[in-house]
Image (cartoon, rainbow, N blue to C red):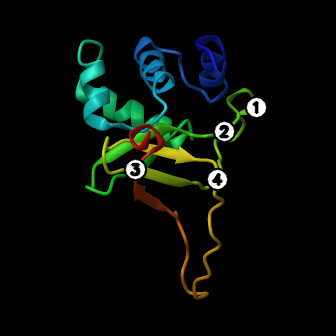
Amino acid sequence: MDNTNFKRLLKSKGLKATTPRLKIFEIFKRKDCAITYSDIERCMAEHMDRVTLYRTLKTFEERGFIHRITGTDGSANFALTPIDWNEFCDGSAEQHIHFSCLKCKNIYCLDSPAMPEVTLPDEYKVEALNIIISGICDRCNG
């Protein structure tokens, strides 16, 4: 998705296409793995303060543009939601598995394998399911 389409998407969700929002989107587009909050903060230091960055990420997460992945070390990581951005409608995306590389420390969204089905007692209500597989990624293993 390019900036023009992202601007349209923001407008369709009742959001203004501000320069900081577009810059954050550019950061995500350039990465093929999840990004830590600290990395985003370093990239955006010249463009916005920490509160604005936090609010923007929260808005992107609430609208389904990005999703949060808690790293194996407890760090907050964010990635673009793996959806067809040209047909983005309601911000919903299917759950997916993440892979955390023990060598380079990157976290990747995986389209496959499919999420396993989990059966819980009727009294439980699932809010989110987060599966992270740890190992060595294809880049580090090569």
- The amino acid marked with disc number 3 is Ile
Task: State which mark lies toward you, 2 or 4.
Answer: 4
Callout 1: 10 Å neighbours few (<14), some, many (20+)? few
Q: Which residue is mark 4?
A: 112
Cα separation between marks 1 and 4: 21 Å
Q: Is residue 26 left or right of residue 82?
A: left
- In the rendered image, which residue does mark 2 sit on? 83
Residue 12 relative to residue 132: left or right: right
Name the N-terminal-most of marks 1 and 4.
1
127 vs 48, left or right, is right
User: Label 1, on which residue?
Assistant: 87
Give the answer, above or below, for where 91 lies relative to 74: above
**Mark 3 lies on residue:** 136
Q: Give the residue drawn at x 65%, y 53%.
A: 94
Q: Residue at x 43, y 11 (%)?
A: 19
How packed mark 3 is, by other alpha carbons closer than 10 Å (few <14, some 14-19, many 20 or more), is: some
Of the image marks 3 and 2, the number of the one nearer the N terminus: 2
Q: Residues within 10 Å of mark 4 (few under 14, many from 20)?
A: few
Give the Cα distance between marks 1 and 3: 33 Å
